[in-house]
Image (cartoon, helix red, strand yellow):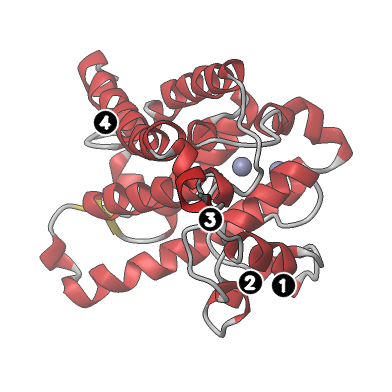
Amino acid sequence: MSITKYLFFLLQILSRYFIIAGVFFLLFYVIYKSKWSYKKIQKIFPLAKDYRREILNSLFAIGLFALIPTLFFKNPVLKPYTQLYDEIAERGWFYYFLAFPIMAFLHDTYFYWMHRLLHTKYLYKKMHLIHHLSTNPSPWAAYSFSFGEAVVEVGIFVIFIFLMPLHKTHLFFFFLFSFLYNVYGHLGWELYPKGFSKNWFGRWMNTSVNHNMHHKYVKGNYSLYFLFWDRWMNILREDYEAHYDEVKNRQAPISAENKS
Ligand SMILES: [Zn+2]
Ligand SMILES: [Zn+2]
């Protein structure tokens, strides 16, 4: 294991974290904070110490995440045991694009059941409480995990490379998308349109309102990208759709100059 290889992946994951979470934080929590605050899912804002805790925990998790690609990429001993392939042409473009939705469903299923396990009495305090210290999460909470949770979170990477043929760009683009969705889930604002939670497509997609309710109430709404498992297991909170509508139907307050 070379240190330069580790630093390369560390820098890659760190920049993904700080650029994406940072841009959303800057827009929603700094530049347009007062203009958009009426639409914030939980109207109050986290404290500076909450942001600090979320960033610090995320840094530890990132330190661990970077170890996994360092171990498996271009490692002559381990790579032959994986299904990683080098040239896209080996499997063709059809397979290349088909792999992404398969990865999303696999990750969603893995995450859902891991998350349900983390909520059992035995594991919750030991492994998942750190993430739930953010009862009103910000984009910085996206990787705010305990060491134990970070280990099981990165497990999907290992499952992917042993389970299905993947090119390195599959992993790059998929985890980029995954992180974007993760930041959206912890954003504190809902970006999907009005009525989305009830339409044929939106009924099956996880939303920021949904994950925010998971942080606020701890029970229910365990999903990642989709709502298949929450709906199939009948564990979606009953007030989810009403809360979604309440957030999306809020009207901008009439400003002082408009009143006079
Ligand atoms: Zn949870
Ligand atoms: Zn969360």
Q: Residues within 10 Å of mark 4 (few under 14, many from 20)?
A: some
Q: Which mark is residue 73?
A: none
- Pointer 3 residue Cβ closer than 8 Å to ligand 2: no
The residue that label 4 is drawn on is 12
Secondary structure under the numbered disc 3 in the rendered image? loop
Give the mark nearer the N terminus: 3 vs 1: 1
Eyeballing the image, is 76 above or below 167? above
CA gap, disc 3 and disc 4 = 39 Å
Q: Label 3 amino acid?
A: Ala
Query: Could you say where residue 33 lies in the image, as x and y percent from the top left?
Result: 46, 37
Mark 3 or 1: the one toward you: 3
Query: Could you say where residue 208 lies in the image, as x and y percent from the top left?
Result: 57, 54
Eyeballing the image, is 216 above or below 259? above
Residue 223 visible in the snapshot: no
Q: Label 2 amino acid?
A: Phe
The residue that label 1 is drawn on is 231
- Marks 3 and 2: CB-CB under 8 Å? no
- Which residue reaches farthest right? 121
CA gap, disc 4 and disc 2 = 31 Å
Relative side of 99 to 199, left or right: left
Query: Could you say where residue 118 lies in the image, as x and y percent from the top left?
Result: 74, 41
Q: Quadrant of the N terminus?
A: top left
Give the mark nearer the N terminus: 4 vs 1: 4
Q: Residue at x 65, y 42 (%)?
A: 43
Q: Residue at x 48, y 65 (%)?
A: 192
The residue that label 2 is drawn on is 228
The residue that label 3 is drawn on is 252
Secondary structure under the numbered disc 2 in the rendered image? helix
- Marks 4 and 2: CB-CB under 8 Å? no
- Marks 2 and 1: CB-CB under 8 Å? yes
